[in-house]
Image: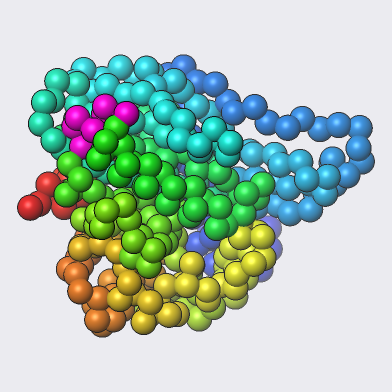
Amino acid sequence: MANSNLPSSLPSILTRYLPLALLFSLLYLFTKEWLDTGPSNPIPLPQPTQDPLDSELEYDFPPFVRLYKSGRVERLYGTAVVPASAFPTPGVVSKDVIINEKTGLSARLYMPEFTKEKLPILIYVHGGAFVIQSAFSPTYQVYLKTLVLKGNLVIVSVEYRLAPEHPLPVAYNDTFEAVKWVLSNAMAGPEKFLSEHGDLTRIFVAGESAGGNIAHNVVMLAGKEGLNNGVRIKGLVLMNPYFWGKDPVGKETRKTEVRRIMESTWGFVCGRKYGIDHPFVNPVSLKEEWKKLGCERVLVTVSELDLFRARGVAYVEELEKSGWNGTMEIYETMGEDHCYYISKPDLDKSKKEMERVIAFFNRP
């Protein structure tokens, strides 16, 4: 029997807000699942003071972060970090390096333990809505060690600076600097993970969610500005990438409130510098730029239930029409939502997606 005490507006409220609530909940879950799997230390957070502005909210980006009028930033989760030695995995070694002491740009490196051959180099960019997570988080420690073991790769996971303290394009610039550092060390050291075991002819950039957005923009920078000694990035992998725009594409949601929130939060992470149709977030808005994409091939993965699915599909379709001189492919997982493979790594679908990504890296 129906519950007559429920407000009549409840169905419309649920319909209106459910897609966004599901997205944010899933982003929370794929991070939270790993937090209790090993030793971790949260990144030190600014504590409130006696300043009344320290508790007066300037902007709320649930469930990720709050910005107060004093400038204090409160991250609600995604701050846990673990040392490179955490979650020991037979056959994989890892270490941390500082790339730029002045800015704090750093990275966590992974490689197979006993390899003597030159391996593909993967520069990985973590997600987290541009405002949370870390290359040193337990989430990525587990995921990337598995990727190294199964894919036989050298991985450089970039610790870029986060918004809102460092609004975009800081994350793009940090990651591009990391790419150039990788190439320099692969050519002549001193980092032996790269100079002795990295193959300069097989450089890849990949990221999931916001990390996918960063990866795309960094490879665009590589195409426009060029890289050390004419080195070219072999491939780009965008997993459930964070792209958006003013007008819906394909079967993307038409819900006004969802679209308003997405536009508002994009403005928050870029310091209101760039509109929602800027190529940073909506690459199809300036398709002629795609001819400069600085890699040879692209793989985009999407999930059927993901809010960003239509954008990933449109990316591949428009890239194909752009005249870019490269190859592109798309891989879709049915019945799953945003970045499901991070929160459910033991799922058969997650294993199949990882196999597809690894095949992309190891293809001649």
| Pick the front one: 188 or 219 | 188
The residue at the far left in this view is: 364
Residue under the point 25% across and 57% down:
230
Seen in the picture, residue 62 relative to 219 is either above or below; the reply is above
**Horizontal arrangement in the rendering, residue 359 relative to residue 302 (left or right):** left
Where in the figure is residue 314, as x and y percent of width and height?
34, 74
Compared to 284, does 267 lie above or below? above
Residue 265 in view of the camera: no
Q: Residue at x 37, y 67 (%)?
A: 224
> How is the protein colored in the picture?
rainbow
Does the stretch in magenta take in 197?
yes
Q: Which residues are magenta?
A: 190-198
Count of all numbered marks drawn on residues in the image: 0
Task: State whether residue 169 is above or below residue 196.
Answer: below
Residue 5 part of the magenta segment: no
Residue drawn 19% across the image and 26% down it = 112
Instruction: List x then y, in percent, for residue 225.
Output: 39, 63
28, 359: nearer the viewer = 359
Q: Position of residue 267 (x, y in %)?
A: 63, 64
Q: Which image quadrant is residue 43 in? A: top right
358 or 111, nearer to the observer = 111
Does any portion of residue 215 appear in the rendered image? yes
Residue name at image x 55 percent, y 58 percent: 169
Image spot of residue 231 (x, y percent): 24, 54
